[in-house]
Amino acid sequence: MAINQRLLKSITCREADTDVSQERKFIMDSEQKHEIYDLLVRQAESLTEDERLPIPNLANTAALLGESLEEINWAGYYLMVEGALVLGPFWGRPACIRIPVGKGVCGTAVAADAVQCVQDVHAFPGHIACDSRSRSEIVIPLHHEGKVVGVLDIDSPIPARFDEIDVAGLTRFAQVLERNCDWKRRS
Ligand code: SME
C-alpha cells in the first residue's frame, strides 16, 4: 500500500521549549495526529499480515515509522533474549546492543511493564544516550502470552515530541506486531 506522503509529512511535534517555539510553528492538531496513526496502523497491518517471523515484520515497520514520522532520529525495537533487551531491527544510527532490564528508558519500560513517555531524556535517571541528538523518547512494551517480549523505542531531537496521542497511536501500532508475529521465533 502506498504511503500517503502528504498526510504523513504533516506530522509534527507540539511546542517543546522556548527556543524551539521561536523557530517552529504549531501545525499539528489532535485530529490530524489521530488520522496519521490510523493510517500507520493500517500500513503496519498490511506490511505484516502475510508474515509471522518477527525480524522481517519489525524491520519493515521500523522503516515505516522512520520514513513516516517527522522529528524523530531513531525508531526501532529491542527484543528480550536470555533475560536482557537486545537490539533488533531499527531505523537510524547504530545503537547500543544490550540493555539490562531496569536500566535506561527501555529497561524501565520492561521492568514496569508500562509505556515510558519521556519529555526530557536528560532528566531521566539512567537514560542511555545512544544518539546524542535525542532529547525526548517514547518506549512501548510488546507482549506475548502476558509477558514482555520486547519494546518499540522512538527517539526525537525535539524535547517533548511525544504526547498522549502518540502513546495511544503507537500502542495500537505495537498491538499489530503483537498479533502478527510468532514471538517464539525472535532470535
Ligand atoms: N535511550 C534508550 C536506549 C536505546 S536508544 O534510545 C536507541 C534507553 O535509555 O533505554
Image (spheres, helix red, strand yellow):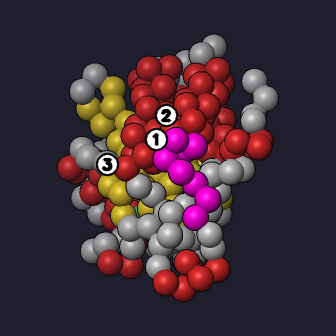
User: Camera-side residue: 44 or 130?
Assistant: 44
* Identity, as a three-letter code, of the amino acid under mark 2: Phe
Q: Is residue 27 magenta?
A: yes
| Magenta part of the chain | 26-33
Q: Quadrant of residue 133?
A: bottom right
Vertically, is 167 above or below 178? below
Mark 1 and mark 2: Cα distance apart in space: 5 Å
Q: Quadrant of residue 62?
A: top right
Where disc 2 sits, the SS reads helix
The answer to whether 44 appears left or right of 105 in the picture is right
* Identity, as a three-letter code, of the amino acid under mark 3: Val
Mark 1 and mark 3: Cα distance apart in space: 10 Å
Marks 1/2 in contact by CB < 8 Å: the verdict is yes
Where disc 1 sits, the SS reads helix
Give the crowd class for mark 1: few <14, some 14-19, many >=20 residues within 10 Å: many
Vertically, is 90 above or below 100? above
| Residue 173 screen position, x and y as percent | 49, 34
Q: Which residue is mark 1?
A: 170
- Residue visible at 30% across and 37% down in the picture: 148
Q: Which residue is mark 3?
A: 115
